[in-house]
Amino acid sequence: MSLFQKQGLSTEELQLLNSEMLNKQKASGVTWLLWFFAGGFGGHRFYLGKTGTAVAMLFTFGGIGIWTLIDLFRLNGMIKTTNEQIENGIISEIRLLKNAENNTSVSV
């Protein structure tokens, strides 16, 4: 997450962001274990929310192992990207709530 996107958030909002990230972020260890034990069935991709490609892996047994092997090299990047998307979503929600509160207090 870039510092630019976190600018403008109060200390309270940053604490809320950190709290939500602890609840929602995807753990590297869990992802790697899923890749190791269920990689051929797309278990790690289901966990990361990549349902479409996970189903494709499930029906092709990980592209007969080739896709699973490729994910060995891509997995850390996939985890990082997924967690960044989660964080961006949380920041968007915080900003929406902040704008809604500002609009409510102005109109009252």
Image (tube, grey):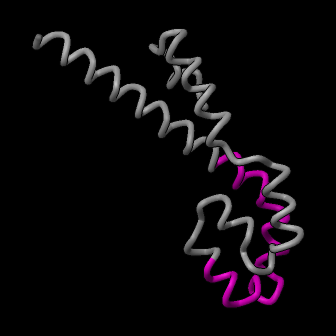
Query: Residue 25's x, y, as percent?
Result: 66, 42
Query: Residue 101's x, y, as percent?
Result: 27, 18
Residue at image coords 61%, 80% = 55
| Dominant SS type (magenta) | helix
Is residue 57 rendered magenta in the image?
yes
User: In this rendering, would 69 be left or right of 46?
Assistant: right
Number of marks drawn: 0
Q: Is residue 57 above or below residue 43?
A: below
Q: Is residue 54 above or below residue 87?
A: below
Give whichever of 46, 62 is nearer the camera: 46
Image quadrant in which you'd find residue 65: bottom right
**Residue that extends furthest to the left in the rendered view of this protein:** 107
Quadrant where the N terminus is found in the figure? top right
User: In this rendering, would 40 be left or right of 79?
Assistant: right
Query: Residue 78's x, y, as percent?
Result: 70, 55
Residue range corresponding to the magenta coloring:
55-81
Is residue 58 rendered magenta in the image?
yes
Q: Is residue 87 above or below residue 47?
A: above
Residue at image coords 47%, 40% = 89
User: In this rendering, would 11 be left or right of 57?
Assistant: left
Give whichever of 84, 29 is nearer the camera: 29
User: In this rendering, would 62 be left or right of 105?
Assistant: right
Residue at image coords 28%, 22% = 99
Query: Residue 35's x, y, as percent?
Result: 82, 67
Residue at image coords 76%, 47% = 27
Image quadrant in which you'd find residue 63: bottom right
Give whichever of 63, 40 is nearer the camera: 40
Quadrant where the C terminus is found in the figure? top left
